[in-house]
Image (cartoon, rainbow, N blue to C red):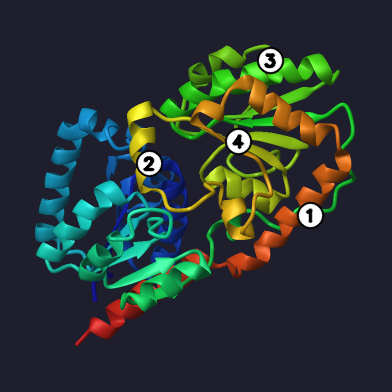
Amino acid sequence: MEPPLILLVAGDPSGDLHGSALARSLKASGARVAAVGGTFLRREADEFIEDLAAHAITGFWEPAAKLGFLLRLGARLNRFLRERRPAAAVCIDYYGFNRCVLELAKAARVPAYYFISPQVWASRPGRVRTLKRLVRKMLVIFPFEADIYRRAGVPAAFVGHPLLDLIPPPPPRPAARAPFTIGLLPGSRGGEVRRHLPVFLESLDLLRRRFGGLRALLFASPHLPDAAYGAAAGRAELVRETGYLRRGQPDLVLSSSGTATLENALLGVPMIVVYKMSWPTYAVARALIRVPRIAMANILAGRELVPELIQGEAVAGRVAEAAAGFLDDPQRLQAVREKLLELRGRLGESGAPARAAREIIGGLRADAP
């Protein structure tokens, strides 16, 4: 019997990374994988269709500039679904484009799963109705998400967070003391780096006037070239790594919002969370977002463990002041570190990609005559 072919579609760097782990688990179960994604899925897929992650398409207005590419990719996937008849399609995060993929799969009568839910609890809860119509099962990574979907009548399984497989519990470390090490995480997309890196570097300059010997590590995205970080030359060490060996070294991180904030929490690294976007996108986001916090560490904690500086507040003076508040008080730094590490227990156990693969393969076996 021919192994089942499963289509994975990821559109951003974190979805690409977690999708590659899912691809490995599906292949270990005997499936073949075709994928739209990025660098990581390209390595794992039996058949790689397109590098969507490299296009870094985000926001509400920005996709208009890539409309031609998205339409062509949608047409390719429509042909793939109708001609190749995969056993299942699995959408990974990245709701905007994946909503279209779900519609195509529904029309082609290909069962669809969703791994890593869009954040319907933060904004646009009406998406739940769309997902109920288009998705066979949601494979969610936060326990409260499963409750949201089940109450709405959407089949859902909490599989745990895939970061737990990548980030083991860090070893104990002594309380921070000077000279401090600062980490810089300006984002995984080119636009995020262009908006955040100048603020981070100016903040770093201000901090160095106050804290002698301050060391800085700038963690690069695997999807961006060194040239994207050129302004940091001589001011921060550029770090490229495929794991998290050095991510736990800083005493404090200046971090873009997103997956990085949860990574920092699992590593026990206190942070200042910063996010800037285009003003039209920000205006729409403000109207849609229903939660008071944007950093996942703060959302899981139910309170502000770490400062968030968004849009107009994301200026060097404010960022440096917030960072100095930590560096001036090592006891506070250590207390926040301990609170962040406690969040790991709320994310289930390791093995999320394998559990997600079992849900998908189990569903396909149930379909078999």
Q: Which mark is residue 276?
A: none
Crowd rating for badge 1 (residues with CA inside 10 Å; few <14, some 14–19, many 20+): some
Q: Residue at x 41, y 47 (%)?
A: 16
Instruction: Decide which of 250, 332 is in the foreground and name it.
Output: 332
- Residue 258: give x, y in percent of width and height: 51, 44
Give SS at disc 3: loop
Q: Amino acid at mark 1?
A: Glu
Q: Residue at x 69, y 20 (%)?
A: 204
Residue 40 vertical placement versus 154 (above, below):
above
* Quadrant for the C terminus in the image: bottom left
Q: Amino acid at mark 4?
A: Ser
Residue behind mark 1: 338
Q: Earlier in the sequence, mark 4 or mark 2?
A: 4
Q: Earlier in the sequence, mark 1 or mark 3?
A: 3
**Contact? badges 2 and 3 (CB < 8 Å):** no
CA gap, disc 1 and disc 3: 30 Å
CA gap, disc 1 and disc 4: 18 Å
Residue behind mark 3: 235
**Contact? badges 1 and 4 (CB < 8 Å):** no
Residue behind mark 2: 285
Residue behind mark 4: 255
Q: Amino acid at mark 3?
A: Arg
CA gap, disc 1 and disc 2: 32 Å
Q: In which quarter of the view is residue 282 placed?
A: top left
Image check: 81 left or right of 266?
left
Q: In which quarter of the view is residue 114 placed?
A: bottom left
**Contact? badges 1 and 2 (CB < 8 Å):** no
Give SS at disc 4: strand
Q: Residue furthest bottom?
A: 369
Q: Amino acid at mark 2?
A: Ala
- Number of marks in picture: 4
